[in-house]
Amino acid sequence: MEFEGRYGQAQRQKYDCLLFDLDDTLYPLSSGLAAGCLKNIQDYMVEKLGIEKTKIPDLCNLLYKNYGTTMAGLRAIGYDFDYDEYHSFVHGRLPYENLKPDPVLRSLLLGLPFRKVIFTNADKVHATKVLSRLGLEGCFEGIICFETLNPTHKSTVSDDEDDIEFVGSTLSSCPGSCNSNIFDIIAHFAQPNPGTTLPKTPVVCKPSEDAIERALKIANINPQRTLFFEDSVRNIQAGKRVGLNTVLVGTSQRVKGADYVLESIHNIREAIPELLEVDKMAEVSYSGVAVETSVTA
């Protein structure tokens, strides 16, 4: 998708794009979706993949720590499954009713005359549902999600930019395990063997620097002129390494790699003075609809 030329600005600003994570960033961790997601992932591993229940906690921890997401880790160690089925199982039973419309955040976002893009590891259906429940439809020009970085028509990642769409559609994979030899990652870390390396995953996701760089390229985003909002410390640090200006959301404690910290996304204006420097009329386009927004410091 072509983004250049869509936003006319009267003067050069420090930032021209705000890149937002979705879950636990645009809404608080206390909503319970993260806890529900973890439970559903564990249930999927037992019910669909036949993994022993006693191994689940350690396995989840190791996969998440080493691969960014449990899903990416499961694929790396040899499990194969339908991605749509996985996402439907994991997200389909989440307590979305806990998310309420947030008119304050909506007004805040629409009042900031910058490009605004969502960047999430989740699938498109989940991302769309969350934005709808929060009442934030139309606040973002696009969504970079699982399908964006993991092309629809292949089980392996493509390096051809033409194979990648901004939002994408559903992704399918052959059911069952194409590799009968499951790599025992628990044993690998229990008794390290210098001659054994961790298998790679075909799934592209944060906190991989490659995933972030691909996302920036797809959306034509200049990292030096972008603020990246995330609740994950490791995603923040990865973003910093690729040149993004970073904002850690959900804490007041500064950590390495975070340029700013916000206890709540609602504190965005107060905590980041640069966003208050604009005092002009800005015409911002969302989904082809022009909205004239007055922004004052």
Image (spheres, grey):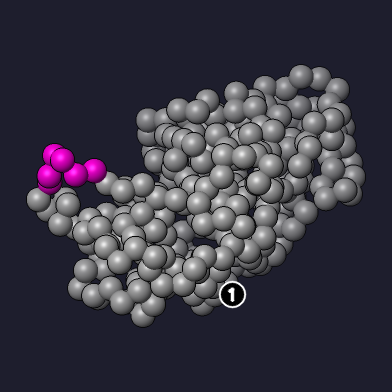
Relative vertical location of residue 159 with respect to residue 36 in this rendering, above or below? above
> Residue reaching furthest left?
191
Label 1 belongs to which residue? 97
Q: Is residue 124 left or right of residue 249?
A: right
Mark 1 crowd level (few <14, some 14–19, many ≥20, 10 Å Cα):
few
User: Quarter-wise, where is residue 45 in the image?
Assistant: bottom left
Q: Is 76 one of the magenta-colored residues?
A: no
Q: Residue at x 47, y 51 (%)?
A: 203
Q: Main secondary structure of the magenta part?
A: loop
Q: Quadrant of residue 279?
A: top right
Q: Quarter of the image containing the C terminus?
A: top right
* Residue 208 left/right relative to 183: right
**Element type at mark 1:** helix
Q: 18 or 212, which is in the foreground?
A: 212
Residue 209 in picture, x, y percent from top left: 46, 35
Quadrant in the picture for the N terminus: top right
Residue 61 location (% of width, % of height): 28, 57
Which amino acid does the dot numbered 1 rest on?
A: Glu
Query: Residue 196 colored magenta?
Result: yes
> Is 220 in front, or is 23?
220
Part of the protein shown in magenta: 192-197
The residue located at (39%, 58%) in the rendering is 75
Is residue 33 found left or right of 10 in the rendered image? left
Residue 55 visible (yes or no): yes
Q: Nearer the viewer, residue 70 or 135?
A: 70
